[in-house]
Image (tube, rainbow, N blue to C red):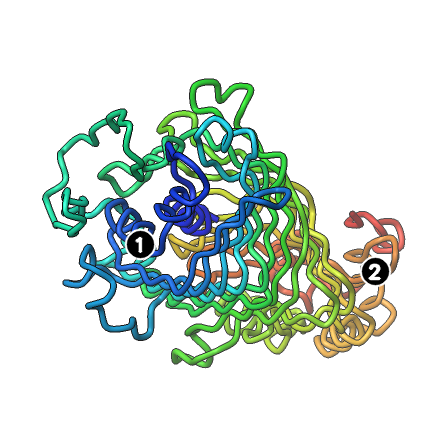
């Protein structure tokens, strides 16, 4: 979410400026492609390309359309006249159109502010590495040089002052940076009050290659739609004004490397369709920077793939070998898979991680997994702490019964043992704790400890005389 807000801020610098003017003709003249590009390149560390600008004043509401936006790493052509520039090639940020509805009252008072911003057809590529950080964030930092217009209208590159200077009042039409958006020299832009009431990103695609974490994953978000409404941000009073509503939908593919069969292999972590809504606190009250904390209620559609590339045997190692003496073989059970039902999750998304605010129930073909409240995943740090409970389907339950019977306990007693670990719906159930790296998780089942407490370490010696005991204890372990 932070990258999206940075992208929006850059577009605000492009399209939203405070402009004294004298008549519609002069306003159109100064809201030009050349001036918008040069002003933007003064504020962000990038080169900008803009195909067309259309300002419509005599409609309701007045509108501004910016077509064919491209943003690329800053080069020698940034800050120079547009006529002498070659076209950008393979820009990491491409936007078909940015559409702004303007505040009519502002125009009458010689000011030019957007009320609604729509970003259509964005295609964004981001590369994240240990050494370089985020390539996308670098584009929206303040550059080391800027461009001003000399009296003869020729752009001239000059060093930026260490502290941004205030715009001086003038009787001549000038373009000045928007007061609501201040991008200081820092990795974290400080928040400022926004006049915008609504922001939307429609039909976008984001491709992320993350090489900073051990898991080294590639993400592809397509058909991405985001709507921010009820925007109320005032850094001077965050106690009462630090909120917006969000709605989103997307198709998500996540690929990466995982340890399978003793070696690292390319796998697909997820292929899912997701949609939902929530409440966002966009500004960190301590640092006063854009650092959104979002409480989201999301739905992952039935048929989506969530995990499934790894078996419990791949992840649990020696912990499962201890269960073999009880005839319980879970090595081939896959962690995740294709969802048999919609998955509803309620999470807190903050600082590139998520925390589950309520239990989430994954219905898979052979079993169900409940991810318990307060479980968490941190994608930036490649770490996790998931508390889960696995509920086996009939086929897997029968496999466990047969396994226990193979250790010399008759079928009746084996079923009583399994029933003792089953829930009210008759599903054989036990807890799994998943910790460590996303690509090298450590899975610990609690069933081994519970079986040892009930039967001891030598199951054959405990087999005789347990039938009557289990009749009295049946259901003791149900949850």
Dot 2: element: helix
Q: Is residue 228 left or right of residue 397?
A: left
Residue 139 visible to an observer of this rendering: yes
Vertical side of 203 occupied by 331: above or below: below
Dot 1: element: helix
Which x, y percent locates residue 306? Answer: 62, 67
Measured Cα–Cα span from mark 1 to mark 2 = 70 Å
- Residue appearing at x 59%, y 53% in the figure: 226
Residue 419 is labelled as 2
Mark 1 Cα within 10 Å, few/some/many (few <14, many 20+)? many
Which x, y percent locates residue 455? Answer: 69, 58
- Residue appearing at x 78%, y 62% in the figure: 428
Residue in front for this viewpoint, 122 or 12 = 12
Q: Is residue 97 left or right of residue 172?
A: right
Residue 215 visible to an observer of this rendering: no
Residue in front for this viewpoint, 419 or 91 = 91
Residue 37 is labelled as 1
């Amino acid at each position: 979410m932070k990258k999206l807000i940075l992208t929006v801020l850059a577009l605000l610098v492009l399209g939203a400026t405070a402009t004294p003017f004298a008549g519609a003709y002069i306003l159109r003249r100064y809201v030009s492609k050349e001036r918008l590009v040069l002003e933007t390149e003064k504020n962000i560390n990038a080169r900008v390309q803009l195909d067309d600008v259309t300002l419509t004043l005599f409609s309701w509401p007045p509108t501004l359309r910016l077509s064919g936006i491209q943003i690329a790493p800053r080069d020698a052509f940034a800050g120079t006249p547009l006529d002498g520039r070659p076209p950008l090639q393979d820009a990491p940020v491409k936007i078909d159109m940015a559409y702004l509805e303007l505040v009519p009252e502002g125009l009458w008072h010689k000011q030019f502010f957007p009320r609604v911003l729509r970003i259509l057809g964005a295609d964004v590529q981001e590369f994240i590495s240990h050494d370089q950080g985020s390539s996308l964030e670098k584009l929206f930092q303040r550059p080391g040089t800027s461009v001003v217009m000399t009296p003869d209208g020729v752009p001239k590159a000059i060093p930026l002052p260490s502290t941004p200077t205030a715009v001086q009042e003038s009787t001549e039409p000038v373009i000045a940076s928007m007061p609501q958006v201040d991008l200081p020299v820092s990795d974290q832009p400080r928040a400022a009050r926004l006049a915008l009431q609504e922001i939307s990103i429609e039909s976008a695609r984001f491709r992320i290659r993350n090489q900073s974490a051990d898991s080294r994953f590639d993400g592809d978000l397509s058909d991405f739609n985001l709507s921010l409404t009820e925007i109320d941000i005032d850094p001077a009073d965050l106690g009462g004004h630090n909120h917006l509503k969000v709605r989103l939908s997307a198709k998500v593919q996540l690929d990466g490397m995982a340890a399978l069969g003793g070696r690292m292999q390319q796998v697909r972590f997820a292929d899912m369709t997701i949609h939902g809504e929530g409440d966002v606190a966009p500004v960190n009250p301590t640092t006063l920077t854009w650092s959104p904390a979002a409480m989201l209620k999301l739905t992952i559609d039935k048929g989506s793939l969530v995990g499934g590339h790894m078996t419990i045997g791949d992840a649990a190692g020696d912990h499962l070998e201890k269960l073999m003496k009880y005839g319980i073989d879970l090595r081939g059970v896959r962690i995740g898979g294709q969802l048999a039902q919609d998955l509803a999750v309620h999470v807190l998304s903050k600082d590139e991680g998520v925390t589950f605010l309520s239990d989430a129930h994954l219905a898979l073909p052979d079993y169900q997994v409940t991810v318990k409240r307060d479980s968490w995943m941190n994608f930036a740090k490649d770490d996790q702490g998931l508390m889960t409970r696995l509920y086996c389907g009939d086929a897997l339950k029968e496999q466990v019964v047969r396994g226990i019977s193979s250790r010399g306990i008759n079928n009746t007693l084996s079923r009583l043992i399994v029933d003792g670990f089953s829930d009210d719906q008759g599903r054989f159930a036990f807890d799994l704790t998943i910790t460590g790296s996303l690509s090298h998780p450590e899975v610990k089942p609690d069933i081994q400890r519970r079986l040892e407490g009930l039967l001891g370490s030598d199951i054959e010696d405990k087999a005789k005389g347990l039938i009557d005991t289990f009749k009295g204890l049946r259901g003791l372990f149900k949850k």
